């Protein structure tokens, strides 16, 4: 509320025409050359209506003041965004206004962010490992920076970390006293110190290196902090090994963590007891991309996908490459399942946006499986295996999707079995709840007839993870089309029922095709039908009348990705089609 025109921001009194009557010095500077014009003259045209609505609002009884966001021209002729606080002076003729430049704050934040990114680049180029210690909290953190990634090597109480280093013999015996002196100097918060000793702390016991350590005392936001650098040195030259992190931790092609580093990161994240999701991901149909567009383009795809992962996760975890087109992501502090879904959805969406101009309908997509600590398991190894199985489910439900494991939906994974077989997961594809509802809707169709088909088809779309369902049925000389989508066009699908060569592909009234492009040269008429409707994979079942004559078809169509239909999906679809056929024949018989 504007109590006086002696405000920090531009503030003043305006008449009902929004001419400035008086104001503080900032107000006159703010109006500049427009001081003899109404305020409307400075406001962006499409914001004038909102300003007038705010003026009317503040004249209403019981409304002390109104805030509105509008754009006002600046000295360069561009428009800045302002938060305007408006107060009626009590006579419905004059207003007090105060203006806060939001754009200035946004630009300042952008500059600060730019400087932060620049500092991240400098830290990355240096190739060093850094550490900080909080005496008040007794927390020690060691990390390194690779552009958008901040990778924690250790983050735990100093005493706990020191005990772990000694117990696992990650310091060479003759240098143990020096290491203990280093820890003591941290606890005593000495100003500036240098230490050198040998160990395998950075590689967690894998390889031994010579370390040079420097730290100093600083005050960060009112808290004393010891900050320092932890360098690996070449003992022959005495120089820092600048590429140590890149050579031991980073995948050379993608610039994200390599398999060993992301494994260590995941183990440490789970061990710390925080909220962690282990995510396994791979690029769908990557072999086809490699074979079609060449290995050089395939490498570009892998690199671009890695960039998506790195930018999406940011400082809330880390991403690593564990194989050719296989990735592992560790996400920390995602709040709840909705938060985790947002991360995974962002990854899936941004991957799908890659190389669209070049690939067209063969766009890049990914399949993702995720597990959660504290919910699925508290053991790193089990979380990885659960995420891997969830990835398997995502791929067999049609790819281009993510699965967050849930025992209720996907059944219990028996993690004690080393040689697990994915085929042994009972409800890996469809939850008990899905199948129960499926059977209820089928029973409803049997009892109530074809009028209750649409809810069944809608549920089938969701359960089988496909794009659309359609039932075509011929009654006398006319056709009836029932679909999960109310306005789905179905004219051209009827052509398939008149193509004898196409009908010869059916076995026992059932036909499945994973890639409709296979028909382009052998059955161009059928291919044209699928191409026009954007169908890439399909399950079909013929419908017959009481004499066994062809009378229609049930179609389950996938339009986004090539889809391999699991055996259970085929069985569900075939059984459902037979029940639908029986109901339609019964209705036709009763109509007679």
Image (spheres, rainbow, N blue to C red):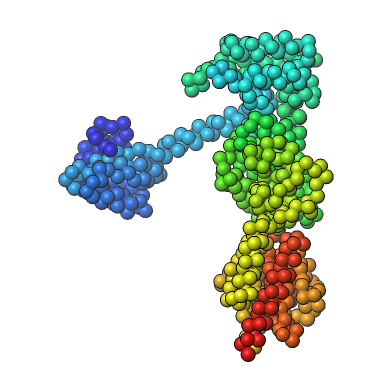
Name the residue at the bottom extreme: 592
Please report the residue visible at 59 percent of the width from the left and 76 percent of the height from the top: 448
Residue 423's quadrant in the figure? bottom right
Count of marks overlaid on the render: 0
Please report the residue visible at 57 percent of the width from the left and 33 percent of the height from the top: 117
Up the image or down, 362 lies above or below 281; here it is: below
Residue 118's quadrant in the figure? top right
User: Where does residue 488 sit, x and y in percent of width and height?
Assistant: 59, 72
Q: Depth check: 403 or 568 in front? A: 568
Quadrant, the N terminus:
top left
Q: Depth check: 301 or 464 in front? A: 464
Up the image or down, 20 lies above or below 228; here it is: below
Up the image or down, 64 lies above or below 134; here it is: below
> Is residue 137 visible to us here?
yes
> Is residue 257 visible to us here?
no
Please report the residue visible at 71 percent of the width from the left and 33 percent of the height from the top: 267
Up the image or down, 329 lies above or below 356; here it is: above
Quadrant, the C terminus:
bottom right
User: Where does residue 541 sit, x and y in percent of width and height?
Assistant: 73, 73
Q: Is residue 8 left or right of residue 468?
A: left
Name the residue at the left extreme: 91
Please report the residue visible at 72 percent of the width from the left and 9 percent of the height from the top: 177
User: Where does residue 426 sit, x and y in percent of width and height?
Assistant: 74, 54
User: Where does residue 360 sit, x and y in percent of width and height?
Assistant: 68, 59
Q: Is residue 137 left or right of residue 178?
A: left
Residue 335's quadrant in the figure? top right
């Amino acid at each position: 509320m504007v109590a006086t025109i002696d405000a920090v921001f531009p503030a003043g009194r305006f008449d009902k025409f929004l001419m400035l009557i008086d104001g503080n010095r900032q107000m006159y500077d703010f109006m500049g050359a427009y001081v003899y014009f109404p305020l409307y003259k400075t406001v962006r045209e499409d914001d004038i209506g909102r300003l007038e609505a705010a003026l009317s609002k503040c004249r209403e009884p019981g409304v002390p003041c109104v805030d509105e966001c509008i754009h006002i021209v600046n000295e360069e002729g561009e428009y800045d965004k302002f938060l305007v606080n408006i107060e009626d002076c009590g006579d419905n003729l004059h207003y007090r206004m105060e203006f806060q430049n939001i754009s200035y704050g946004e630009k300042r934040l952008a500059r600060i962010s730019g400087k932060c990114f620049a500092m991240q680049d400098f830290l990355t180029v240096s190739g060093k490992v850094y550490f900080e210690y909080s005496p008040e909290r007794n927390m020690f953190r060691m990390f390194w920076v690779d552009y958008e990634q901040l990778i924690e090597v250790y983050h735990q109480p100093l005493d706990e970390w020191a005990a772990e280093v000694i117990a696992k013999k990650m310091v060479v015996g003759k240098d143990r006293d020096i290491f203990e002196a280093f820890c003591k100097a941290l606890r005593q918060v000495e100003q500036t110190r240098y230490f050198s000793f040998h160990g395998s702390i950075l590689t967690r016991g894998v390889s031994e290196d010579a370390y040079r350590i420097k730290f100093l005392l600083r005050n960060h936001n009112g808290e004393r902090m010891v900050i320092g650098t932890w360098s690996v040195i070449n003992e022959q030259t005495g120089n820092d090994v600048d590429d140590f992190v890149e050579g031991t931790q980073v995948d050379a092609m993608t610039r994200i963590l390599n398999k060993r580093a992301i494994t260590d990161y995941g183990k440490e994240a789970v061990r710390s007891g925080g909220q962690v999701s282990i995510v396994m991901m791979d690029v769908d149909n990557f072999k086809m991309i490699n074979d079609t567009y060449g290995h050089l383009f395939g490498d570009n795809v892998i690199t671009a996908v890695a960039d998506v992962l790195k930018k999406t996760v940011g400082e809330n975890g880390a991403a690593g490459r564990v194989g050719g087109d296989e990735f592992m992501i560790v996400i920390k502090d995602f709040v709840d399942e909705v938060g985790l879904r947002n991360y995974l959805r962002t990854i899936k969406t941004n991957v799908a946006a890659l190389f669209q101009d070049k690939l067209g309908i063969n766009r890049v997509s990914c399949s993702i499986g995720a597990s959660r600590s504290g919910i699925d398991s508290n053991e790193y190894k089990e979380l990885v295996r659960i995420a891997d199985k969830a990835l398997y489910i995502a791929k067999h439900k049609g790819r281009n999707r993510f699965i967050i494991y849930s025992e209720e939906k996907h059944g219990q994974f028996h993690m004690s079995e080393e040689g697990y077989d994915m085929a042994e997961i009972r409800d890996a594809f469809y939850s008990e709840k899905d199948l129960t509802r499926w059977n209820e809707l089928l029973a409803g169709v049997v009892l109530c007839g074809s009028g209750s088909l649409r809810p069944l088809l809608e549920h089938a779309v969701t359960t089988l993870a496909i794009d659309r369902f359609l039932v075509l049925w011929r009654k006398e000389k006319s056709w009836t089309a029932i679909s999960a989508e109310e306005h789905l066009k179905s004219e051209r699908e009827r052509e398939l029922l008149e193509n004898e060569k196409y009908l010869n592909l059916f076995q026992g009234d059932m036909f499945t095709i994973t890639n409709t492009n296979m028909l382009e040269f052998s059955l161009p008429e059928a291919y044209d039908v699928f191409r026009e409707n954007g169908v890439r994979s399909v399950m079909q079942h013929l419908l017959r009348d009481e004499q066994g004559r062809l009378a229609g078809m049930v179609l389950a169509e996938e339009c986004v990705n090539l889809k391999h239909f699991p055996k259970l999906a085929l069985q569900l679809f075939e059984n459902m089609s037979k029940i639908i056929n029986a109901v339609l024949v019964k209705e036709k018989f009763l109509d007679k």
